[in-house]
């Protein structure tokens, strides 16, 4: 089966599921698509007892797609740039220090808390897993997913200053989370005795700082190019080239592509650049183009997440471990946010119950699944993939559906 046919099938399914959601369910896209895809996949399973043709066709499509590579190396850059482009830069500038601490210290603390607790929980449930692999799970499940978060917050009625914290954190902690995961992955692969503290710090620093510096340079070059012409067609293509060239350069330089495109997107999207480099017509076309890219890739992504169920080995013991992991992941996120919020709440005007809203509104999504798919068999890939899947489904369907109600309830208090 060629790639054009696979893409055609995915886009057609995405269009069909999107139509059903908008026409009948009327749920936020992220939630609606996840729900419809899961129902569709379960229906395919049920139908396979009569005729397995459709199940085999779906399984074949999924096995032809390297989900981890497609999401982390291709789709993620476009999705993050689109998210950063539409982020309120002025609010984010005000909240930059808490966002920075949430995205670095918060993710690191959550990684270790989840890793430690899961290590002992898995021992109790009879699953013998080395601590380093539990730490890997902590790294892949700790970052919140901007792709899932952005769509739902728009409909949840979250106060703007809190939205800036949640969106800003999810844009940056995603890039940082991927770097932490890759660092621990390297330690797990080579053995801790072969990886010194200096080596780890150098790898982490190069990925993070290098990614942000590259993004700053890309953003500045894009700004200068946009400012020097007034042609909305070419200007839209320039923003597209920024993402594609930026991602390719980041991979070549071994710096973080997600952090590079987020930084570039924030620069290109901020009001000063928009006001001096883009005409009103260009601004409208750039925004609409990236909104369309965002919606299209989001839709395909959540169809892919649902279809991945077909190739996951759902064992009862693994599902139980996944259900236990849900409150653990939420509690660890709450604790990891507690200290930064206490530190900054006196200096910045924090919304009441910020920690609770950020914990419940910090959704997990495709990035966690993509990282889990990158584990090797020795790292208990099947176990952690099922646990991750259970956490992600709960996060999107339960947390996503109720975060709006939680915000409204807390507003009344």
Image (cartoon, rainbow, N blue to C red):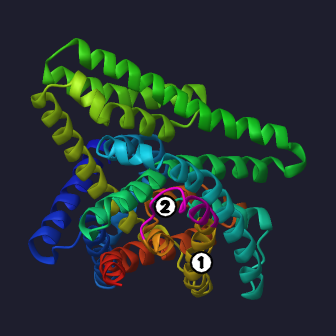
Q: Position of residue 297 (x, y in %)?
A: 29, 50
Q: Say which residue label 1 marks.
A: 331
Look at 14% across and 71% down and name the residue there.
Answer: 20
Task: Find the distance from the CA under tag 2 to the CA under tag 1.
Answer: 14 Å
Residue 228 vertical placement versus 367 (above, below)? above
Residue 29 vertical placement versus 119 (above, below)? above
| Residue 407 magenta-highlighted | no
| Residue 347 magenta-highlighted | yes
Q: Which residues are magenta?
A: 339-351
Please state, as top left, top right, bottom left or bottom right, where the C terminus lies in the image: bottom left
Residue 388 vertical placement versus 88 (above, below)? below
- Please name whichever residue, 264 or 9, is drawn nearer the observer in this view of the structure: 264
Residue furthest toward the top?
A: 228
Of pointers 2 and 1, the one earlier in the residue sequence: 2
Q: Say which residue label 2 marks.
A: 144
User: Would you identify the image quadrant in which residue 22 lies?
Assistant: bottom left
Look at 44% across and 28% down and name the residue there.
Answer: 246
Q: Position of residue 8 (x, y in %)?
A: 22, 49
Q: Position of residue 396 (x, y in %)?
A: 38, 72
Look at 11% across and 76% down and name the residue there.
Answer: 24
Q: Position of residue 305 (x, y in %)?
A: 39, 63
Residue 244 visible, this angle: yes
Residue 126 vertical placement versus 90 (above, below)? below
């Amino acid at each position: 089966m060629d790639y054009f046919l696979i893409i055609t099938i995915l886009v057609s399914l995405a269009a069909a599921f999107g139509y059903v959601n908008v026409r009948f369910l009327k749920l936020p896209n992220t939630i609606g698509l996840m729900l419809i895809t899961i129902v569709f996949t379960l229906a395919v399973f049920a139908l396979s007892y009569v005729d397995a043709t459709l199940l085999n066709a779906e399984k074949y499509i999924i096995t032809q797609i390297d989900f981890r590579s497609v999401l982390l190396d291709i789709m993620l850059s476009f999705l993050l740039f689109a998210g950063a482009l539409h982020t309120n830069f002025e609010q984010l500038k005000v909240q930059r220090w808490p966002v920075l601490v949430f995205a670095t210290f918060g993710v690191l603390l959550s990684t270790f808390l989840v890793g430690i607790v899961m290590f002992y929980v898995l021992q109790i449930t009879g699953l013998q897993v080395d601590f380093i692999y539990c730490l890997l799970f902590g790294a892949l499940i700790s970052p919140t997913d901007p792709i899932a978060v952005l769509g739902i917050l728009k409909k949840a009625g979250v106060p703007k200053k809190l939205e800036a914290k949640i969106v800003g954190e999810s844009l940056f902690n995603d890039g940082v989370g991927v770097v932490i995961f890759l660092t621990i992955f390297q330690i797990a692969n080579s053995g801790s005795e072969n990886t010194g503290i200096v080596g780890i710090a150098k790898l982490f620093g190069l990925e993070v700082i290098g990614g942000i510096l590259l993004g700053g340079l890309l953003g500045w070059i894009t700004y200068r190019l946009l400012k020097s012409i007034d042609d909305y067609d070419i200007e839209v293509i320039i923003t597209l080239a920024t993402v594609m060239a930026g991602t390719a350069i980041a991979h070549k330089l071994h710096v973080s592509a997600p952090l590079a495109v987020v930084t570039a997107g924030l620069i290109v999207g901020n009001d000063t650049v928009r006001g001096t480099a883009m005409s009103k017509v260009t601004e409208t076309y750039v925004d609409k183009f990236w909104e369309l890219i965002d919606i299209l890739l989001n839709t395909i992504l959540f169809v892919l997440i649902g279809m991945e169920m077909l190739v996951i080995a759902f064992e009862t013991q693994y599902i139980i471990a996944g259900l236990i992991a849900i409150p653990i992941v939420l509690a660890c996120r709450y604790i990891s946010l507690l200290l930064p919020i206490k530190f900054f709440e006196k200096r910045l005007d924090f919304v009441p119950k910020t920690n609770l809203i950020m914990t419940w509104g910090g959704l997990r999504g495709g990035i966690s699944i993509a990282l889990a798919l990158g584990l090797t068999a020795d790292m208990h890939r099947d176990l952690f993939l099922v646990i991750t899947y259970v956490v992600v489904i709960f996060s999107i369907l339960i947390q996503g559906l109720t975060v709006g109600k939680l915000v409204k309830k807390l507003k009344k208090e």
